[in-house]
Amino acid sequence: MKLLITGGAGCLGANIIDAYLERPGMEILVLDNFATGYRASLPQNAENLEIIEGSVSDEALVNRVFDGFKPTHVIHSAAAYKDPDDWVEDARTNVLGSIYVARASERVGVKRLVNFQTSLTFGRPETTPIPNDAPSKPFTSYGVSKTAGEQVMLAANLNVVSLRLSNITGPRLSIGPIPTFYTRLKAGKGCFCSDTYRDFMDMSDFMAFLELALDADAPQGVFNVGTGESKSINDVFDQAVAYLGITMDEPVPVVPAGADDVQTVVLDASETEKAFNWKAKVSFEDTIRKMYQWYDEFGVTAIFSHVKAPDVEKK
């Protein structure tokens, strides 16, 4: 397999490389601009791994990379989300970048393209867990641009599966409440919890699914990838407090979801489970514990978010 991963220095990309690099006959190429990914997350001097710095929004670069490497499989993980107000950069990366990747994939005859999509494509859903066929109603820069990019992929003449992902939790995670609580509590700083609910999946469950999704004979289309289990951000905080052995004098403040946030994003993956004969197995408690054990050993890098921080964080 010749696997090209856009955004391969991010959390998901780096874990995929860890899992696939040593397989016989595997060649991997990573294209990443390192805006939110880290070069240090990638193996250095591996003979079957090529790392190219650059953005998927650079059409000429994308074409050179694809024409030179000629991938058989593509994982499109690249995404811009660093600044919630930067609609232009999000559009360049998430929309134009998807167009360039799709066109290049068509031209070189890619056998299977796996697109990573945010579950924020559903906007503020009418029902939860969110069914696989729920309408897309994004309203943020990240959600709107990623949804447009997904439509580009689905419209291309390609064998495509687009995965609407829950909160995938594993080594190198640097976004969201899990690393935030760990970092702030270890430093003796205060925390707050947004009044929101999410679906947290362990990286091992995701990797088991990705193995199936990369198969060129597997189902095409869009699929939810999650546990279907709703957990509050307060639940995550409680796990962090328990893991670190901290005694709280007062309950942690809980604040309403911000204007650009969604209160509940929990995915119904029943259609995915049927189509791929797969199901998430790792419990929420074990998922969080494994993450904190990893931070104990390797630490936390800079933390990013696709939503604006409420004023309470500044206090």
Image (cartoon, grey):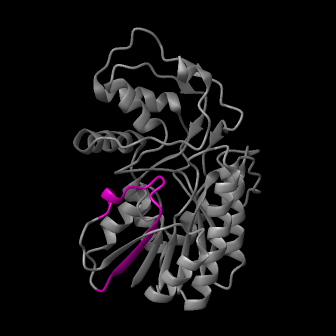
Of the pair 220 and 98, the residue shown nearer to us: 98
- Classify 245 as above or below 112: above
Q: Can you give x and y, in whole percent of width and height, for residue 122 in the image?
A: 71, 52
- Taking the magenta stretch, the answer to whether it contains residue 34 is yes
Q: Give the range drawn in magenta.
A: 25-42
Image point 62% across, 78% down: which residue?
A: 102
**Residue, far top:** 249
The spot of residue 165 in percent (x, y) is 55, 56
154 or 126, which is in the foreground?
Answer: 154
- For residue 305, side relative to residue 239 (left or right): right
Judged left or right of residue 18, residue 135 is right
Q: Which of 275 and 164 is in front in this view?
A: 164
Give left or right: position of 149 versus 175: right
- Which residue sits at x=31%, y=44%? 290
| Rendered image quadrant of residue 274 | bottom right
Picture coordinates of residue 154 (x, y %)?
69, 74
Query: Toward which corner of the image does residue 126 lie, by quadrant?
Result: top right
**Residue in the picture at 47% in, 60% down:** 279
**Rendered view: 147 above or below 296:** below
> Residue 2 location, x and y as percent?
40, 84
Q: Is residue 296 above or below residue 36?
A: above
Residue 58, can we see it? Answer: yes
Q: In which quarter of the image is residue 23?
A: bottom left
